[in-house]
Image (cartoon, rainbow, N blue to C red):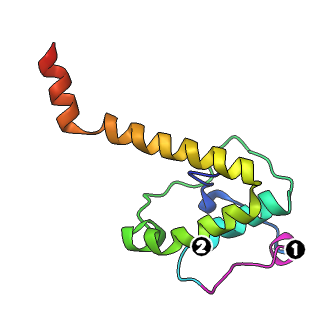
Amino acid sequence: MFMNGICHQACFIARKTYLAAGGFETTHRTGADPRLLMRMLLRDRLPHRHVGRVVVCYQGGGVSAQPQNVRDSQPWCNLQKRELYSRGEYAAFACLGWLRGAAKRVLYDPFLWRAFQNRR
């Protein structure tokens, strides 16, 4: 939930629950879906369940996935994470996120892989 979130396209939310949670935050152009889900699951601790079946197939690449929009919505999502997670949880998850990012940079760096293969 901290790093990847939940696929909002596959969530079914009762209207009563949606209204009780305050609905979408429309003050920002992107990121309303993850912020709503974070509020509902972390702040309100609403019960949820995994249904174990495919309910949606999509290609990805929507408005929220565009690099500029990710940069625009990230501060608001991070602010909400700070509000919804305890200080210790936020620090632990942020550290894990940094380590994950560092590992991905190393694993996908072609220069490092060429250097490694040349050592063999």
Image-based side of 41 in relation to 71, left or right: right
The verdict on residue 21 being magenta is: yes
Segment colored magenta? 17-27
Query: Dominant secondary structure of the magenta stretch?
Result: loop
Residue that carries the numbered disc 2 in the rendered image: 76
Residue sitting nearer the eye, 64 or 51: 64
Image-based side of 40 in relation to 1, left or right: right
Q: Amino acid at mark 2?
A: Trp
Residue sitting nearer the eye, 96 or 49: 96
The image shows residue 25 at horizontal and vertical percentages of 68, 80
Outermost bottom residue: 27
The image shows residue 57 at horizontal and vertical percentages of 52, 54
Kind of element beneath mark 1: helix
Circle nearer the N terminus (2, 1): 1
Say which quarter of the image contains residue 107. Answer: top left
The image shows residue 10 at horizontal and vertical percentages of 64, 57
Residue that carries the numbered disc 1 in the rendered image: 16
Determine the residue positioned at 79% across, 47% down.
49
Outermost top residue: 120
**Which quadrant, please, contains the C terminus?**
top left
Q: Is residue 117 above or below residue 5?
A: above
Give neighbour class at mark 2: few <14, some 14-19, many 20+ (Cα, 10 Å): some
The verdict on residue 96 being magenta is: no
Residue sitting nearer the eye, 44 or 14: 44
Kind of element beneath mark 2: helix
Q: Nearer the viewer, mark 2 or mark 1?
A: 2
Determine the residue positioned at 52% across, 72% down.
73
The image shows residue 82 at horizontal and vertical percentages of 69, 62
Give neighbour class at mark 1: few <14, some 14-19, many 20+ (Cα, 10 Å): few
Determine the residue positioned at 41% across, 37% down.
103
Say which quarter of the image contains residue 28. Answer: bottom right
Residue sitting nearer the eye, 15 or 2: 2
